[in-house]
Image (spheres, rainbow, N blue to C red):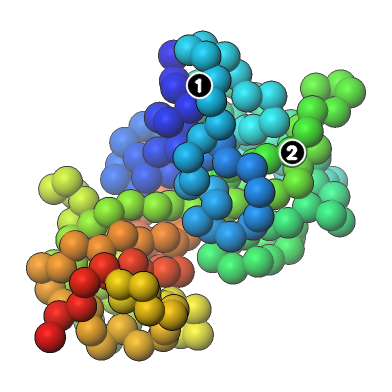
Amino acid sequence: MTTAMDRRRLLTSAVLGSAGIAGATALGSLAPETAHAAPAQFTPGEVDPNFAEGRVTGIKDHVLLVTGSDNVLHRIQVTSGTSIWKLHPTTFDQVAVGDGLYARGVPLPGGALGADSLWVNIVSMSVEITAIGHSWLHLNHDGNKVIGHVVPGRTAAVYRDAPTTGDLSKLRIGRHVHIIGAWRPDTNEVDLATIYAGTVAA
């Protein structure tokens, strides 16, 4: 059975070409870091009723039909109060069939999940920079190639504990970083939101 920690790796697995998409179990804000925060504690085999993960297989009115990594079908009700992240805060009309997502909310009568927050296509992974271009980074994650796209006005870096900056010039080939971004479905490509670079090259 899939554990809470394993479910957080669903979209990372999809980026790397593995089967399925992984989910997050965090409550709280829409910040992308929140989606990959430490999961709530559950006993083995227990299902979190306030969480759903998977891939969008259909959209009807304001209900998303989502097939989870365990092949369970979820119905996710989206309202005007639902917060949606897809590289940046966005609106329901930007969610598409084929997207992967993590959802947090409350169970509704009839079995649907009333979504408070949706994180669409979000990935969080540690990588090594293998090449740097004007608008892209080639990345390696455990021997798997990932292409990171720099999005003007969106992609930012955090060096050590310094404030977030749009200056990516301190990134270096061979450096290990952590990325948060939005997966491009059915590819090994990610639109980069934040790059956590840790130490800075001289």
Q: Is residue 46 above or below residue 158?
A: above
- Where residue 9 sits, quadrant-wise, is top left
Q: Which residue is mark 2?
A: 105
Q: Are marks 1 and 2 in contact (CB under 8 Å)?
A: no
Query: Is 5 on the left-hand or right-hand side of 67?
Result: left
Dot 1 or dot 2: first in sequence order is: 1
Would you say 149 lies left or right of 74 here?
left
Q: Residues within 10 Å of mark 2 (few under 14, many from 20)?
A: many
Is residue 101 shown to the viewer in this render? yes
Name which residue type carries label 2. Answer: Gly
Residue 181 placement (x, y as % from top left) = 44, 62
Under mark 1, the amino acid is: Asp
Give the spatial CA distance, label 1 vs label 2.
19 Å
Q: Residue at x 21, y 72 (%)?
A: 199
Q: Give SS at disc 1.
A: loop
**Residue 70, numbered label:** 1
Label 2 element class: strand
Can you name the residue that lies furthest to the right here?
Answer: 109
Q: Is residue 167 above or below residue 26?
A: below
122 up-or-down from 112: above or below: below
Residue 17 place in picture, x, y as percent: 30, 42
Of tags 1 and 2, the one toward the viewer is 2
Residue at 63%, 24% in the rendered image: 48
Mark 1 is surrounded, within 10 Å at the Cα level, by few (under 14), some (14 to 19) or many (20 or more) other residues, namely some
- Horizontally, residue 164 falls left or right of residue 197, namely right
Residue at the limit of the structure toward the front, as seen here:
161
Q: Nearer the viewer, residue 200 or 150?
A: 200
Residue 162 placed where, x, y %?
38, 79
Decide which of 88, 199 is in the foreground and name it.
199
Could you tell whether 71 is left or right of 200 in the image?
right
